[in-house]
Image: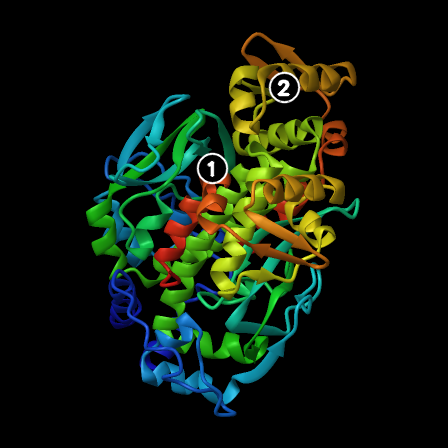
Amino acid sequence: MANGDVTVEGTAQLGRLVPLLPGARNDAAGKAINNVILLSLPDEEYNLLRPHLESVELPQHKILHEPGEKIDQAYFLNDGMTSLVAMSVDGRSVEVGITGREGMVGMSLTVGLLRGTFRAIMQMSGSGTRISAEIFQTVLPCCPTLRSQLSRFALMQGLQVAQLAACNRLHDIDQRLARWLLMCQDRVDSQSLPLTHEFLAQMLGTGRPSVTLAAGALESSGLIENMRGTVRVVNRKSLEQAACECYAVIQHFNGGLGLK
Amino acid sequence: MSEACESLQGSGVERKPRGENRRSIRTDSTGRPVHNSILQSISDTEYNLLRKHLEPVDLPQRHILHEAGAKLEFAYFLNDGMASVVVLTSDGRSVEVAIIGREGIVGTPLAVGLSRGPHRIVMQIAGSAVRVKSAVLRETLQSTADLYLIWNRYVLIQGLQIAQIAACNRLHEIEQRLARWLLMCQDRVETETLLVTHEFLAQMLGTGRPSVSLAAGILQRGGLIENVRGAVTILDRPGLEAASCECYFVMQRFGAVSNGQ
């Protein structure tokens, strides 16, 4: 059962996940790595991955994966934020998960699912590294810590998504908009978020007028400022109070991933 | 490194589970048969390590396997029946975010070292299971590489199911969601009559009881189901599938993947 020991050694370490400092590692092109999972691997595993990690710039709205299409690459973000978006056959959409530098985009590959179910789209521009699906699947069995880290991420992401599933059903658009802006700001460290109401409507699974109405209410209370194509967070403390409890719950899960 | 690599690749876990090829019926520590797909998928060696710790339990409807925020005392492997994973909000409302039958595990956070789970897990349809103490499970997982991998595969597939429900909760009408729910439930119990009240359905679907009764009335007038006191009978399954949103079929595909098909 030697392999069992190896596999679970990684698991035991997970409770006290201590990633290296951002920039302590670099990719094949020498660019600094800021992704928590990549920074948490032992050297021998990282060195297996490193030659295959290709630096990529990820501009806002770039689509990383399209539902039903083959997943060619797995992405490890250094910064920025990806939304996982479910698309209904009637053309409507809603966000069902967020991944930033704490995770990997293309998690289905870890269980051999080669086609994605959701659209993965850059919500906030950033950068990262990517690895081809084929190489990733070959290397993964040789990387027990990577597997453990990804398993933990899958579980925590599942908890986050479960909270979103409840939130989507039970909470008002004002609360959900506030929650969404906070989650977004957590990942970009800037007060100004380049977002149109149209795009927010697609994320929140509602019509644009409802978003504009809710954003107007938050603006009248002095919490945010709506400008063309940008939402500026003016009073973060009050925005936290305006959000539903889901924000605090999800933030707690993210803490378990070394994000905040 | 390379040793671990070879043995992991050789474990067969990335390929089809062995459930269909197994030669003998597996039994728990008291000799009762075990029908859980996960337990049927692991190797004999690993199963034999677990077997003596598997305690059979009968799980009546409404039995709470795990309360939100409480310590996870046991992991459960259902043989039959169905459990709901429910998110509770501070204002007392609730909504179901996943369902678990004999294809799955209750207590998934244990495998990544978490000792508490944030959701209520409640038996929706009565059934039975085998359970194992959390501490024992954690220790056993150190020598059951197959179970560890299959467990994590299940976690990911369940995550996809939850994401689909997250979208469904937002985008689809109550009639569609009710039809989807009844189909998912029937898939796990294999009877035509489901013992569920509209009140309970409302808690699962995150809506009020009157909305459920209205939607159930519409499905009944269409000849798809029959509402009787405390139960719903499915009369026309293909019709119900047509009335459901696409989410039912999407999630069915996830189920096939988790069974290695």
Asked if residue A1 can be seen in this view, the reply is no
> Mark 2, chain letter?
B
State the residue in front, A188 or A4: A188
The quarter of the image holding the C terminus of chain A is bottom left
Measured Cα–Cα span from mark 2 to mark 1: 23 Å
Q: Quadrant of the N terminus of chain A?
A: bottom left
Q: Can residue B99 be seen in this view?
A: yes
- What coloring was used for the rendering? rainbow
Q: Who is closer to the viewer here, A211 or B192?
A: A211
Q: Position of residue B233 (x, y in %)?
A: 63, 17
Identify the residue position indicated by label 1 in the image: B101
Q: Which residue is drawn at 44% across and 32% down?
A: B89
Disc 1 marks which amino acid? Gly
Compared to residue B158, the image places residue B197 above or below, namely above
Which label is found at residue B212?
A: 2
SS state under label 1: loop
